Image: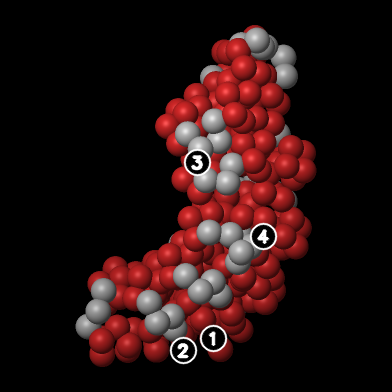
Amino acid sequence: IELVLPLIQKVLEEETANLDIHCEAAVTYKNIFRNTKLTSRFTGLTDIILSGILRNVARQKDNLSAAAWLETLVEVLDNVPLPAIKDSILPVALSQAEPTQRVQRRVIATKLIEKLCTVLPALDVRKELAPCAQMLAQDPNANVRGSIAQRLGFIAQSLHNANDCGTLLLPCLIELCKDDDVGVREAILNTVAICLPHFSKESSKSAIIPLLKKSTEQAVFLQDETLSVVAKNLGQWIYNLKVSV
């Protein structure tokens, strides 16, 4: 392993345009990283693999190849120590969310944010991930907005603070519920129930209830795909609001 991995990495750096090689290598790196029997036999193997993944993310200009490595990062993140996540993976997630990145990279950034929410302390979620999510919620591309809409619940759970949720997430919720794209509205309406327990009574009364009332009326009027989403979630909305208000 110690002899082979540097050779593989060298080939990857030479064959930057070969999508097949990068996709196969990404799967191999992921499988090695997850193989606890193998990683326990070779001290520092996980560090070498993670370093290789991050290097390939940084070096890869081809968007499909870069996406393969970013997806690999999403899949191995659960097994990465917290210090390495803060030092190495969090900056990657934030950089991939930038408006200058391709749409596919920004979508994958939302997946990284979801995973990071499950492992990072609430302080890091508030300072780093929530502002990034706010930016992605205003993204010009509907696929990106829809993807972050699906993940606001994870941020709310990780913040676990009604004031922070009201300040950082409620504006996103309101804007996404009014989105022009029906797919984005579907995504956020499916997420609302997860967010509800994390808002204050005041936010629920003054903002959430009027928002859901308006969204329901709009769905009935338009008779679009959001109507079935409202029907599916209405019971959970009422229950959560009854408990919290």
Residue at mark 4: 129
**Residue positioned 32% across, 89% down in the render:** 217
Q: Earlier in the sequence, mark 4 or mark 1?
A: 4
Q: Earlier in the sequence, mark 4 or mark 2?
A: 4
* Amino acid residing under circle 4: Leu
Q: State which mark lies toward you, 4 or 1.
A: 4
Residue at mark 1: 207
Q: Earlier in the sequence, mark 4 or mark 3?
A: 3
Q: Earlier in the sequence, mark 2 or mark 3?
A: 3
* Amino acid residing under circle 3: Ser
Q: Which mark is residue 154?
A: none
In the rendered structure, are the residues bearing label 2 and label 1 in contact, judged by CB atoms less than 8 Å apart? yes
Residue 209 visible in this rendered orientation of the protein: yes
Q: Quadrant of residue 109?
A: bottom right
Residue 123 position in % (x across, y down): 76, 58
Residue 18 position in % (x across, y down): 47, 34
* Amino acid residing under circle 1: Ala
Secondary structure of residue under mark 1: helix
Q: Earlier in the sequence, mark 1 or mark 3?
A: 3
Residue 143 position in % (x across, y down): 43, 65
Residue at mark 2: 210
106 vs 148, nearest the viewer: 106
Q: CA distance from mark 1 to mark 3?
A: 43 Å
